[in-house]
Image (cartoon, rainbow, N blue to C red):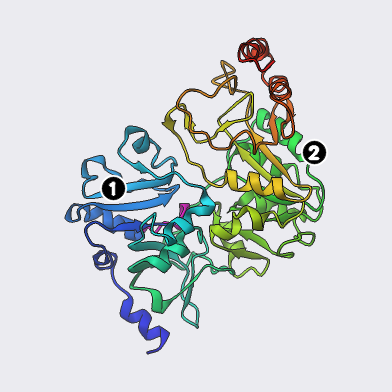
Amino acid sequence: MSVQELYRQKHLSPEDAINQVKDGDFIVVPTGVGEPPALLSALSAQRRRFHDVKVAQILPIRKFDYFDPSTAEHVRHVSFFFGAASRAGGQAGDIDFIPSYFSEMPMLIERGMIPSDVVFTLASPMDEHGYFSLSLAADYTMAAIAKARAVVLEVNPNVPFANGSCHIHISQVAALVESNQAVTEVGLPVIGPVQEAIGKYVADMIDDGSTLQIGYGGIPDAVVMQLTNKHDLGIHTEMIGDGILTLVESGAVTNRKKTFMPGKMIATFALGSKKLYQFIHRNPALEMHPVDFTNDPYLAAKNDKLIAINATLQIDLLGQCGSESLGPVPYSGTGGQVDFVRAANRSRDGKAFIVLPATAKDDSITRIVPMLTPGTHVTTGKNDINYVVTEFGVAQLRGKSAKQRAQEMIAIAHPDFRAELTQEARRLHLL
């Protein structure tokens, strides 16, 4: 049977395609805009016919009807990383949370520690050889496909066909549906004077020829906007967004000086504009790979001068980062922060930056604290942290004593809180 005949045989309506799901199934959905809206809408519409079905995902973009807490016994969301669509449900206890390092999620799936009964994913149109590209999010989805009983694709002509280890053959597909709505676009965060100040400190410490990992947020993007005059930058990251596209268009990114996979940009998921998605399509300079490849600290560290730029919500005087909760209240998730901090620390001449505004709530609360708020989910530990940057300067912590760390951190806190932090540091015998 030809690949075209297989395609026609497996082509169903969304309402029929979700018959692949059985009671008790664990459905794996890709990160962000890789989620398939037609399939998840059909599942939502028929959710009351199922029992104990779970839909697991990092960073859902749309709040589908199955998020309804009153029908959670039928279909319930499971989060690997909270976003705007899932945060309230997570904080209310209506959504389950599975913490893990992003890089280890494929391994957890392969070993059966995270189930994978069914995969729902957005995919590019099929090529002449019978392959689809999961260009928007290879992440943990490729591992889930290898374990799943059934893979259901939502094929959309607006999804690019990317190079890399992100392809699935029609013979691996149980059912597919077609849709043609635009891929969700996610704009750049707002950048204000605080973000610009932090961005300048970081940008000044990035040399030509560095390879970048850039997290999502106003501060990482503020760094990016100040790198357009750099030369021969490379990209090895988890997320490719419009900030990186800006660097490519400015000529700052060439990937020529990369010491691991030179000439290639490497990422595991995309989050940005239609222009970004078009840039990904069959671009020989870009490859999308599973997250156990992109985020493996050993592999990423093969890039000399690896620069990791990630944000946190709160940090203590020893350098412990609470990047995913506000006290005990969940806010996001672990993601790839630890993966890339460790990679940059291992990299020859690498630099790992943790960035944050010094205060919150109109300068009424300090984000640099003597001790993390009780119940805070510690994301990156004190032994991994190197550079911490606020709008008041740069603290360098690795190799420093507890006393030196406290002094460095107090120096980059908001001036209004330095006396209080000094007093608390003495009480804790840090000074």
- Horizontal side of residue 372 vs 414, given as left or right: left
410 up-or-down from 117: above or below: above
> What mark, if any, has residue 76 been given in the picture?
1
> Mark 2 or mark 1: which is in front?
1
Q: Which residues are magenta?
A: 31-37
Which secondary structure lies at badge 1? strand
Looking at the image, which residue is at 40% across and 75% down? Answer: 172
Looking at the image, which residue is at 24% across and 66% down? Answer: 19
Instruction: Check the picture and name the quadrant holding the C terminus.
Output: top right
Question: In the rendered structure, which amino acid carries the disc numbered 1?
Answer: Arg
Question: In the rendered structure, which amino acid carries the disc numbered 2?
Answer: Asp
- Horizontal side of residue 210 vs 221, given as left or right: right
Contact (CB < 8 A) between labels 2 and 1? no
Disc 1 crowd, CA 10 A, few/some/many (<14, 14-19, 20+): many
- Horizontal side of residue 240 vs 125, given as left or right: right
Residue closer to the observer: 284 or 184: 284
Q: Residue furthest bottom?
A: 1
Looking at the image, which residue is at 45% across and 47% down? Answer: 59
Which secondary structure lies at badge 2? loop
Residue 69: x, y in percent? Answer: 26, 40
Residue 300: x, y in percent? Answer: 66, 55
